[in-house]
């Protein structure tokens, strides 16, 4: 009988190894940025699921854009009323995209986001850079302000 328990543990451990590591969730987004403008892609707070403050989010880039640059900024911001932790002042990290001068066309960016709770999510942004229009767009989204 003492042989059965180690064998069961060995089999269970082998199944866990065969299953491999847990894969991060992948979220794909499309964004449009005006040529010559900076576009805000993502702003992530340092709030845990229980709305308490945790460590700042971490980004790990695996594919940089070929026709632009990535800007990462830290700051403080109040969460929107529709957020799971509404109207709470929090530390935030933002990811922005700046196309090369005169570029129009498609670009792509892939990175992992580690939240304050330690959850990891892969983000894939497919970016369309359009010629700048004379009319005003969303000024907040078309800047590197958080």
Image: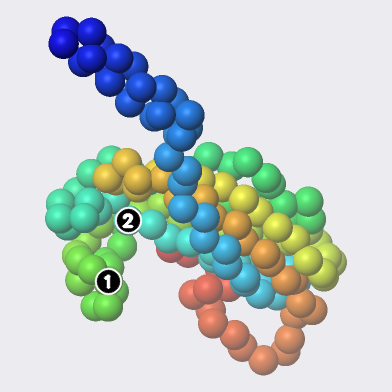
Question: Which residue occupies the extreme front position in the image?
Answer: 1
Instruction: Please say if 78 is above or below 108.
Output: below
Residue under the point 56% across and 47% down: 111
Instruction: Please say if 47 is above or below 77.
Output: above
Residue 131, visible in the rendered structure: yes
Query: Which image quarter is the C terminus in?
Result: bottom left
- Mark 2, secondary structure of its residue: strand
Residue under the point 51% across and 50% down: 122
- Mark 1, secondary structure of its residue: loop
The circle drawn on residue 45 is: 2
Q: Is residue 30 left or right of residue 1?
A: right
Nearest to the observer: residue 68 or residue 128: 128
Instruction: Please say if 77 is above or below 58.
Output: below
Residue 73, visible in the rendered structure: no
Q: Residues within 10 Å of mark 2 (few under 14, many from 20)?
A: many
Residue under the point 43% across and 60% down: 43
Q: Are marks 1 and 2 in contact (CB under 8 Å)?
A: yes
The image shows residue 87 at horizontal and vertical percentages of 20, 71
């Amino acid at each position: 009988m003492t042989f059965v328990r180690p064998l069961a543990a060995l089999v269970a451990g082998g199944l866990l190894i065969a299953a491999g590591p847990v894969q991060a969730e992948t979220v794909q987004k499309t964004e449009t940025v005006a040529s010559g403008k900076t576009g805000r892609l993502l702003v992530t707070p340092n709030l845990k699921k229980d709305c308490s403050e945790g460590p700042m989010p971490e980004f790990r880039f695996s594919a940089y854009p070929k026709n632009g640059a990535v800007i990462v900024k830290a700051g403080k911001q109040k969460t929107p009323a529709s957020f799971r932790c509404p109207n709470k002042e929090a530390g935030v990290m933002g990811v922005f995209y700046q196309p090369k001068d005169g570029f129009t066309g498609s670009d792509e960016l892939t990175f992992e986001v580690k939240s304050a709770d330690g959850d990891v999510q892969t983000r894939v942004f497919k970016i369309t850079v359009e010629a700048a229009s004379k009319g005003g767009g969303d000024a907040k989204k078309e800047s590197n302000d958080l």
